[in-house]
Image (cartoon, rainbow, N blue to C red):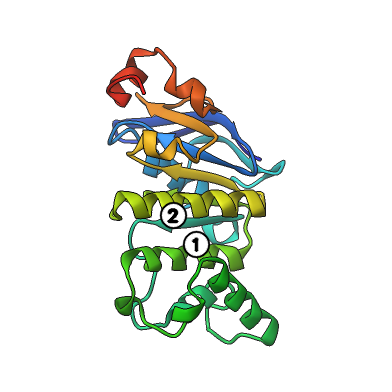
Amino acid sequence: MLKLNRALYRDKDFQLSASFEAKSGEVTAMLGPSGAGKTTLLSLISGFASWVSGQISVGGTEISQLSAADRPVSMVFQDNNVFPHLTLAENVALGIAPRLKLNMAQQAEVEAALLRVGLQALAQRKPGQVSGGERQRVGLARILVRRRPVLLLDEPFAALDPGLRRNMLSLVADITRERDLVTLLVSHQPLEVAEKAQSAIFIYDGLARACVPMQDFLGDKDPAIVAYLGSPP
């Protein structure tokens, strides 16, 4: 479980506060209007930005004082998930061996991860030789070899076609369940994400609200949520 307790962030005129719990084995959608602070919140959890006050814990262990490299967190962005000069297999291997010097056990892990995301036949290709969806699968395969309990996804599939986005969301949901991960997924497609996410956190007006079941969120009559969704689902 990921828990934020009275976490507060300030940057000039922008302020964001958060107190919530996100469960392991579930995909939690991070939703809210543009500029609300969704990406900022992921950066704060991952350690790339700093809170003014409050605590963050994973599995009951406080991580607020840990560096980004030492936090039990993996993050996948919309872009820059791969290095173009490396093969897909080498890009995945970076998750466990940054110098790309793998022992036999690590090599087997990379091969298993590529197989899990359907890239085993493309392992020796460069990113420029595969599709956008296949490049995004590299980022997920790297998550598998890193074996960290919290997965943060910052609109990683926004540039993909709707059908491919759904396929990738299904893969994320499967990996989350199989690995018992805490998965937070930022998206501007709430109804699409609702098909695979079990819960939602709404970020609005400087506040990350408590995590609630997805169906409760979709049926919420709060004017801010109704305006965000546009019309009842």
Callout 1: helix, strand or loop?
A: helix
Between residue 132 and residue 90, name the one nearer to us. 132
Residue farthest toward the front in the current orientation of the protein: 163
**Quarter assignment of residue 83:** bottom left
The Cα–Cα distance between marks 2 and 1, rounded to whole angstroms, is 9 Å
List the residue tagged with mark 2.
Answer: 168
Q: Which label number is shown at residue 129?
A: none
Q: Where is residue 177 in the image (x, y as percent from the top left)?
A: 63, 48
Callout 2: helix, strand or loop?
A: helix
Residue at the image point whose x is 36% and y is 49% from the top: 155
Left or right: where 143 falls relative to 17: right
Residue at the image point whose x is 48% and y is 80% from the top: 121
Between residue 88 and residue 55, name the one nearer to us. 88
List the residue tagged with mark 1.
Answer: 140
Q: Is residue 4 visible?
A: no
Q: Is residue 111 visible?
A: yes
Residue at the image point whose x is 49% and y is 31% from the top: 200
Q: Which one is earlier in the sequence, the residue at label 2 or at label 1?
A: 1
